[in-house]
Image (cartoon, rainbow, N blue to C red):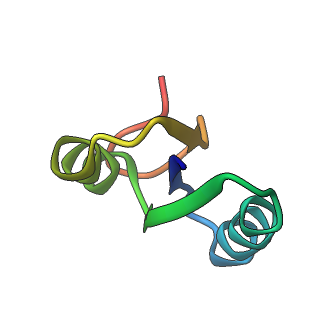
């Protein structure tokens, strides 16, 4: 199982990405973060295999 973390500040885009990943066999969304700082924290906590990351976000950008 490939674990996925989604880091995206737009709730609608979060949900679209989550639904897309959940349809792919062998992938599992383990978390969603709304900004870069929260995303870094969740990466440290969960060590996902894949991060789907927005570039333009508040508090900490995706770069």
Vertical side of 15 occupied by 46: above or below: above
Viewed as shown, does residue 45 lie left or right of 21?
left
Q: Which residue is drawn at 54% across and 49% down?
A: 1
Q: In which quarter of the image is residue 55?
A: top right
Q: Which residue is drawn at 26% across and 53% down?
A: 42
Q: In which quarter of the image is residue 12?
A: bottom right
- Name the outermost residue toward the top: 63
Residue 40 x/y as whole percent: 26, 42
Residue 38 x/y as whole percent: 27, 56
Q: Closer to the camera, 11 or 43? A: 43
Residue 31 x/y as whole percent: 42, 65
Q: Closer to the camera, 42 or 29? A: 29
Q: Which residue is drawn at 82% across and 67% down?
A: 23
Viewed as shown, does residue 41 lie left or right of 54?
left
Count of labels in the image: 0
Residue 9 x/y as whole percent: 54, 62
Viewed as shown, does residue 31 lie left or right of 10?
left
Q: Residue at x 54, y 63 (%)?
A: 29
Vertical side of 51 occupied by 39: above or below: below
């Amino acid at each position: 199982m490939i674990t996925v973390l989604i880091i995206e500040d737009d709730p609608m885009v979060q949900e679209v990405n989550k639904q897309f990943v959940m349809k792919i066999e062998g992938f599992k969304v383990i978390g969603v973060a709304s900004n870069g700082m929260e995303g870094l924290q969740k990466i440290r906590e969960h060590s996902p295999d894949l991060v789907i990351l927005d570039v333009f976000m508040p508090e900490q950008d995706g770069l």
